[in-house]
Image: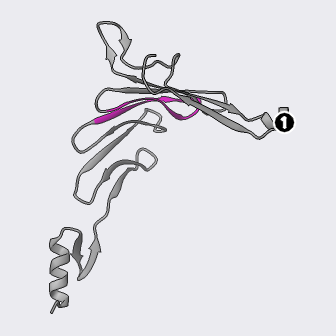
Amino acid sequence: MLGAANLSNILENTGEFINENNYLWQVSGRQTFSSAGFYLPVSSIDPFGNVTLIEYDHHNLLIDRITDPLLDAILVDNDYYTLLPREITDTNLNHTEVAFDALGMVTALAVKGKYDEHSGQWEGDTITDPTVVTVYELNNWKDNRQPVYVRTSARETHKE
């Protein structure tokens, strides 16, 4: 028969619960905050103790870099007009860029890939010839008495 002591032992040894003051607590992720940076989260610690670091711009407004426990970094180039990321560089140095309209809505997305130093070009698409184009018809009801709509077109292969 499974008693309370055996159950407690099993739960503690699986690594999913900790015993604190004779109470079993399930381990969850937690964040640490910077008092110097308006108490923004500066790291995230998962249940296994792995730390992900979060770095902000010099205004402490937007995220500039996220470094995972394996020290792989994601870099962000921000657009301060929209207060959104404009270009993201992943851990494999692939770049993805977006363009915004005056309302801050995404109008184009380019999966640029890596930059080729020899040719001076991106391996993938550019923001002038993007992967995804989005057109918003927000005044369609006012102008044509037709429903407002959004049209998105995406290419399936890059650089065509």
Q: Nearer the viewer, residue 20 or 47?
A: 47
Instruction: Quickly name the residue at label 1.
Output: 142
Taking the image as shown, residue 50 lies to the left or right of residue 123, namely: left
Q: Is residue 5 above or below residue 11?
A: below
Q: Quadrant of residue 101?
A: top right
Taking the image as shown, residue 53 lies to the left or right of residue 57, namely: left
Q: Nearer the viewer, residue 36 or 70?
A: 70
Amino acid under label 1?
Lys
Taking the image as shown, residue 150 lies to the left or right of residue 48, namely: right
Magenta range is: 73-90
Q: Residue at position x 15%, y 85% from top?
A: 6
Q: Is residue 95 above or below residue 3?
A: above
Q: Is residue 92 above or below residue 24?
A: above
Question: Where does residue 66 sit, x and y in percent of width and height?
Answer: 34, 39
Check if residue 81 falls in the magenta segment: yes
Q: Nearer the viewer, residue 135 or 56?
A: 135
